[in-house]
Image (cartoon, helix red, strand yellow):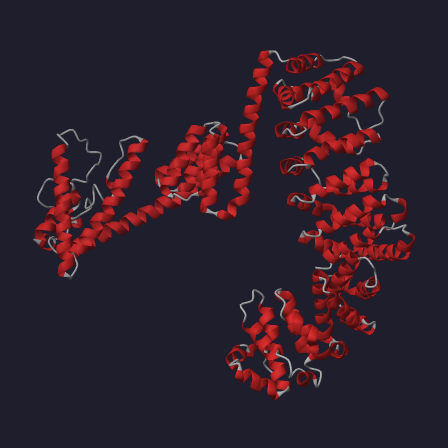
Amino acid sequence: MHRGAWRRLSAAILGSPSPWRPPGRGLLAKEVSSSCFEVKMSHQQEEQELQKFLRDVDDITNLIQGLNSTDPAVQEKAIAATEKRLGSLKENEENDCGHRVDRTLINGRPSVKDLPNQEGLTNPETFMAALEKDAQERARRRKKNEALANALKEEGNDAFGKGDYATAIQKYTEGLKKQKDMPALYTNRAQAYIKLQEHEKAILDCEWALRCDEKHLKAFFHMGKAYLALKQYGKSRGCYMKILEIDPHKEQLCKDCMNKVDLEEKREREEDKAAEELESGRCRAVSVNQLLQKLSRPNENVLFYTGGIQLLTDAIQDCTEQTLFRTNSGFSVINDNEVMRRAFRPELKSPAEVELSLSLILLWQAVCKGNEENQRLLLTHPYMNSQLPALVHSEVPEIQEQCLALLSLYAQTEHGRALLVRHLDLTKWLQTLMSFVSVFDSRASRAMDLLTSLVEEEKFKIQCRIKLSTEVLPWFAQLLNSIQTVNQTALVQCISIMGDLCSDPVIRMQVAESQESWQACLDLMDKCWSESKATKCPPVCLQAVLGLMMNASLEVSVAIQELAEEISWRCMRFLSSQDGTVVTRAVGLLSHVLPASPKAGEEAVKQGLVKKMIRILKSGAQITSGYALKTLAVCTKSSRQAQEELVKLDKKCSLLLKLLCSEEETVAGNAAFCLGRCLEVPGTATNLLSTDIVKMLLQLSAMDAQRASVQENAAIALGKLCTADARHASRLQELNGMAILSSSAKYVQGL
């Protein structure tokens, strides 16, 4: 039975009606060796044949392994499965009715040297060796084809980069002839098809890529773009949702893509509605169309265009008129008119030209308010894109104000801000908008509000990096020194904006390294403090500069180290302020600056820093207390005087023990650190015998903290406690805490 099954299975593998034939070059002609047939079918039929072929290879390999097994039970099971498969093959042949087309070319003349001797043909080991040899040959050919396919892919990528999409498609297609299951070739070709507006072909290629890899993200991405171009919005969203399902880290990408789908669908609805209203003869809809036709007349005088634009602005009341302006080529009619283009010249204008400029900017406001597509078209129009910066620099205050109002429309939405960042060169806008601090009208507040909105965009921060050190910071330092001659409300906003920019690590480092900026901040602090009683300088100005310095001091720099004593001295002075925000930021700045300069820490301790920090801790203000405790930790780390003062002022360390139980890990960890330093003062450990300090430290040492430093500080304090007084060690044994302390031995070595 075993030998008979082998023979029948071999015949089935060879696809021959003969009882049996030796395995040679044509060993897996129909179901194993892909090099022994030429495809003569459609693209879809070829894929189905390939998938069936791969499944059959796996099935037959498993059967052969079972027949070759030394386990009789496995052999019997394999024989039964083989008989079943042979029966199925026979039934398929009988049902074929003679109409089957053989799509394979079998090597009917194998070389004699490739045939094993007849005696070994019935040997399973010989058969498996032949099968393995064939598999190795297929692997070698696949590796060679894979290298060729990759080379063709790179050639296609080069052509794509040059904009030669037809050649790119040709190269990707040649690569797929070498290797049909390479998803990157399908998705790259799909991308080229999208460039040529052949979106159906792109979708088909993405589907093929997903057959090769069902989680191929690029396939879903390009398929989503193609469906969007075909206005199949639901399918497009489905592709991006699938990306998010496969990789949740692509949330921002999917969000941006689905926003595009939403905007495109909204644009189509708006245009359909606008067309219906125009066709129905709605008054304002017709007016927009007629006015645009009149304004398209060239070489009229300035007053003609000014009057027409004002009438057009009045006619635009809602989304329908905004859409009709767009669909009737309003942007081209206005921006391509030479007379109106001259109205945007940066040099001084006649009163008529000023009036025309103002009318145009007001028209843009009416057209773009709440309309994302119009906002995009205005910014992407080459002429307006280049003229907006000139309008902001205009010598006419009214033009500046209305241009800022136009830009503020964009800043009100995330989409609008993204358009500004994407389509305008904002490398100089930080300094340009900050310059409005010197004016005393609504332009200052508009400019600061616009900057505040832009700072939310990471790409804006990246653009600000370029000229920050060379142009912005020197100018900013001069601005801080001119507090008496600038709009102080706008100055406070300006300083806060610079502090917000410091959330970017590159900008923060540049500010931290600018000694000129630090010195200007110190001088401003002095002016704020000396003049605060006369109310000439509002407390918010001091708050703002302290906030900026706090954020910048997160980076250690030479400038901070050199000025640490001056900074800490001023912060100590502000601790007596009645303004809680000033006190909080002064303590926070101390906690950042003192680690940079041991000398500054010593001077602060001499000025009574420990007593001031304890007073703040007792007040219970959460944020301020956190900074105060960190400041104490810095001082007690290097100052014996600070340790002794803390022990003296905090009887039996009651305050530290209370903070040790804080739910905030940072507070508990810093409390443990300070306690460990206090235990270096003789007698401190003995004074704590009546407390439950051992249990508290033990719990902190054993807790599953996110910050390893919390456990480390608690373990060190516990080790110092037990070393200083053996009675604490006895208490530790009673609590069965020696194992925990032993596991923390790496923290307490040398104690």
Instruction: Say which quarter of the image contains residue 435.
Output: top right
Instruction: Say which quarter of the image contains residue 86.
Output: top left
- 664, above or below 442, in the image: below
Q: Residue furthest right?
A: 534
User: Looking at the picture, how far across and down is residue 720, in whole percent?
Assistant: 63, 82
User: Looking at the picture, how far across and down is residue 472, in whole percent?
Assistant: 78, 47
Residue 201 visible, this orientation: yes
Residue 390 visible, this orientation: no
- 307, above or below 40, in the image: above
Closest to the observer, 662 or 288: 662
Relative side of 709 to 468, left or right: left
Closest to the observer, 682 or 149: 682
Relative side of 158 to 311, left or right: left
At horizontal 57% and vertical 84% (from top left) the residue drawn is 731
Relative side of 423 to 585, left or right: left
- 361, above or below 490, in the image: above
- 619, above or below 546, in the image: below
Q: Residue furthest front?
A: 690
User: Looking at the picture, how far across and down is residue 555, in whole percent?
Assistant: 70, 59
Closest to the observer, 67 or 102: 67
User: Looking at the picture, how far across and down is residue 215, in whole percent?
Assistant: 41, 44
At horizontal 36% and vertical 42% (from top left) the residue drawn is 212
